[in-house]
């Protein structure tokens, strides 16, 4: 819920927190979240780190997109290999001592060909060792399911049933990555738009401190304008919290698991707010001298 109340300090009306966002630690106000993250951001980056998290996140999105696209291409190639290899139907009938027939499957080379295709496609992407570094059996089980993966890695015969299952599981792996690709594109747009919305108020705040030799009314008008500028930063954080929900939340958690902070937009917004408030303090100092 968005707050609408205001408080008065030193005879000047201050804008209240514009809303509440959800974090892994519970609900916090946007202002409190920005203040907490600002401390971490300044400690990690210093004053020169403005917007550096969003820039790093955009680079990460591009890298991850290339990798996911490569995996889609690899699974598509493996899918073609499944279609190109004919399942084995040959069976041998034997008689048990009790004269009861039993069916024995004969080994063939087709499954070995399919297994090699899996290694030469799915496991041959450039980032495989860095991202997965698994044996064929481990990776096949992880991607295709325990039963189908074990059959591919350790089985003897490429049966029609096995091919059907592998086709279904391969198609599912492709769909998962296509969905993830859509989420990455969505995040890239969010980062670009958030960066634009952060840059504009910071740029405006620079105009509000140049020059500082105006009379009291003009300085007071500038000071009041800082309320609007700060709220624009806070609104970015509120919108970002709405963006990072549902399916996006799990994607973002994965994408930024190696980041020193959970969200690059919140981190850069806090740094931007710090710059703006430092400039606002300069206007307050000029007001004090002009009064």
Image: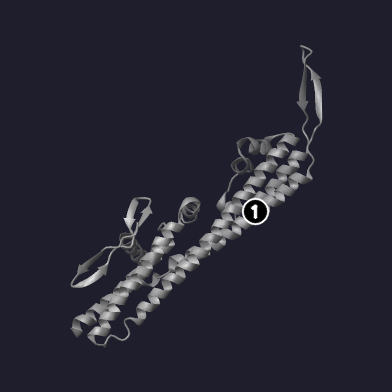
In the displayed orientation, state which residue is furthest to the top.
98
Q: Left or right? Give the position of 237 relative to 96.
A: left
Q: For residue 125, say whether it is visible.
A: no
Q: Residue 271, image x and y in percent?
A: 36, 68
- Which SS class for mark 1? helix
Q: Nearer the viewer, residue 72 or 26?
A: 26
Q: Nearer the viewer, residue 53 or 221?
A: 221
| Picture quadrant of residue 284 | bottom left
Q: Residue 68, image x and y in percent?
A: 60, 55
Q: Left or right? Give the position of 112 relative to 282.
A: right
Q: For residue 247, say whether it is visible.
A: yes
Q: Does 226 appear above or below 121?
A: below
Considering the image in quadrants, where does the C terminus appear? bottom left
Q: Left or right? Give the position of 184 relative to 161.
A: left
Q: Left or right? Give the position of 106 relative to 9.
A: right
Question: To which residue does mark 1 refer?
Answer: 72
Q: Residue 141, image x and y in percent?
A: 61, 40
- Residue at the (34%, 72%) spot, across then down: 228
């Amino acid at each position: 819920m968005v707050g609408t109340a205001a408080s008065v300090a030193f005879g000047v009306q201050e804008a209240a927190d514009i809303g509440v966002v959800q974090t892994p630690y519970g609900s916090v106000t946007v202002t409190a979240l920005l203040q907490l993250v600002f401390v971490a951001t300044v400690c990690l980056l210093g004053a020169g780190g403005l917007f550096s998290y969003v820039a790093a996140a955009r680079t990460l999105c591009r890298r991850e997109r290339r990798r996911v696209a490569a995996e889609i291409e690899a699974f598509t190639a493996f899918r073609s290999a499944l279609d190109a290899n004919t399942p084995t139907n040959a069976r041998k009938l034997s008689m048990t001592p009790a004269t009861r027939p039993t069916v024995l499957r004969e080994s063939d080379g087709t499954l070995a060909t399919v297994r090699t295709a899996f290694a030469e496609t799915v496991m041959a992407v450039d980032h495989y060792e860095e991202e997965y570094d698994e044996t064929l059996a481990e990776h096949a089980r992880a991607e295709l399911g325990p039963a189908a993966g074990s059959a591919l890695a350790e089985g003897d015969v490429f049966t029609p049933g096995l091919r059907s299952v592998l086709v279904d599981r391969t198609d599912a792996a492709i769909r998962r990555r296509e969905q993830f690709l859509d989420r990455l594109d969505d995040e890239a747009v969010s980062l670009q738009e958030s960066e634009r919305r952060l840059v504009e108020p910071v740029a405006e705040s620079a105009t509000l401190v140049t020059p500082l030799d105006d009379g009291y009314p003009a300085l007071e008008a500038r000071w009041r304008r800082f309320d609007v500028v700060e709220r624009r930063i806070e609104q970015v954080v509120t919108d970002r919290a709405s963006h990072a929900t549902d399916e996006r939340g799990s994607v973002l958690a994965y994408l930024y698991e190696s980041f020193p902070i959970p969200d690059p937009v919140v981190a850069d917004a806090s740094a931007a707010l710090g710059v703006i408030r430092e400039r606002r303090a300069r206007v307050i100092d000029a007001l004090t001298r002009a009064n």
